[in-house]
Amino acid sequence: MRGGGGAAVRRAGSAVGAGTALLAGGCYVHLALAGRALAPGGLARLSTVWALVFSVGIGLFFPVEQELTRALTARRAGGRGVRPVVRRGIRTAACLALAAVCLAPLALPLLDGRLRMAAVLAGALAGLAVAHTVRGVLAGLGLFPWYAAQLAGDGLLRVALPAALWTAGCRDAAAFGAVLVAAPVLSCVPAALRAAGALRGDAADRAVAAGPAVVADPAGADELRRGFLPLLVSSLLSQALANAPVIGIRLLAPGAAALTAALMGALVLVRAPQFLVTSVQAGLLAALTDRWARGDTRGLLRRLGAAVAAVGAVGLVAAGAVAAAGPWALRVLFAATAAPGRVDLLLLGLGSAAYLTAFVLANGLLAMAGQRAQGAAWAVGAAVLLAGWALPAGLPPVTVVGASYLAGAWSVAVVLAVAAVRTARRRAALITEERDEHERTGHLVDG
């Protein structure tokens, strides 16, 4: 990616963009068909599973994808073998998946005690473990067309499977929830085979295997482990914040099944720009990591600033659009019988714009090995969110969760922005000091 980081990011974004668009469309179709097929109670349970999958699940397994992308990119840039990192990533994802599956029954109170929905939740969490691990390997190896193909296959299955259920007259929430298990796993099969082929053909790994000392690579194994726990904590907090409105309304107004389902649809609408962010995330992280490794802190901040400006602007436009057309869109697209008002939708939209801005900034800090700063920022946001849920009881619950989401997300964005600038400036100062010291030493030798 040297010398052409911007072009590489654009190529990666183009490759992944189409797949991301299909995945986004598949998510919309899945929820829309479920909204037409299921009764309010079943739809509320499916919405709760959806929120838990995309908070706990992505919170657990997206860090695996990010760390695989970062570590594999760095090792390839240094001409080192990548298989030790891949093996560590697979083991890490498997352990996290086992823990998530075992803990899934704890969600039974939120699922009205339905064991089948808890089983769907467990399966969907395991499916995300597979998907994010495969995506991390693909991105780290630079196989962005295959990354895009996995996203596209996932999206197409999220259209085809719910459509088949709806056509057959299915009214079972667990059946619609099973799509969250099947789509990511099935779409990973061809991509995983391609990644395995690339790993078998890796020249650096072949050289290591042919060397005189064929031993484990503890540095490679530890490379993924360093900083992973803070990143995992920050990812869990970030995804909990992203999906907090649905969980919050379920806790603050447990009998409002129709409102829970409508709020899930509203979050899908206001987070539409998130798919734009996802389309450039893998390539952006690789480019920022490359700049950091080369000491190009100024270029890193320029690239990060441009991404933040673009995502923030799109998020604000989307917030206004959803506030204006949201009630109508929820009725037409998701068959909602109870929709949040325009002010509440605007709160959700502005919070989503802040969340997406924070998401991009977090990628910048990850490239700078700032996982601990990430964790601190998301912890601040979570604290602000929980404090917001304690607002005066006279406010409608939907307003409480919307305002809390807005305050928490903007708190994270501000803390991350400050941390990113400070970290980059400290690195630039160290590089300048080292260069000056080298020049002084050179003058002394010449003298």
Image (spheres, rainbow, N blue to C red):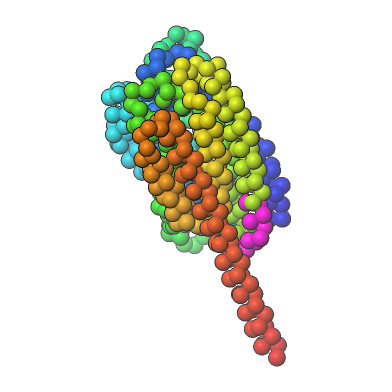
Q: From the viewer's perspective, tell me whether residue 328 is left or right of residue 1.
A: left
Q: From the viewer's perspective, tell me whether residue 111 is left or right of residue 290.
A: left
Residue span colored magenta: 295-304
Magenta segment includes 297: yes
Asked if residue 277 can be seen in this view, the reply is: yes
Q: Residue at x 69, y 42 (%)?
A: 11
Query: In the image, is residue 199 above or below residue 270?
Result: below
Quadrant in which the C terminus appears: bottom right
User: Looking at the picture, how far across and down is residue 102, in whole percent?
Assistant: 30, 36
Q: Residue at x 41, y 30 (%)?
A: 396
Near-viewer residue (55 or 221):
55
Residue 3 location, quadrant: bottom right
Residue 295 location, quadrant: bottom right
Magenta highlight: main SS: helix
Asked if residue 196 can be seen in this view, the reply is: no
Q: Residue at x 65, y 46 (%)?
A: 309
Near-viewer residue (284 or 304):
304
User: Looking at the picture, how far across and down is residue 88, in whole percent?
Assistant: 43, 49
Near-viewer residue (192 or 429):
429
Magenta segment includes 371: no
Q: Residue furthest front?
A: 394
Residue 354 location, quadrant: top right
User: Looking at the picture, how far across and down is residue 334, in whole percent?
Assistant: 51, 19
Query: In the image, is residue 261 above or below residue 427?
Result: above
User: Looking at the picture, how far across and down is residue 355, in whole percent?
Assistant: 52, 42
Q: Residue at x 54, y 57 (%)?
A: 418
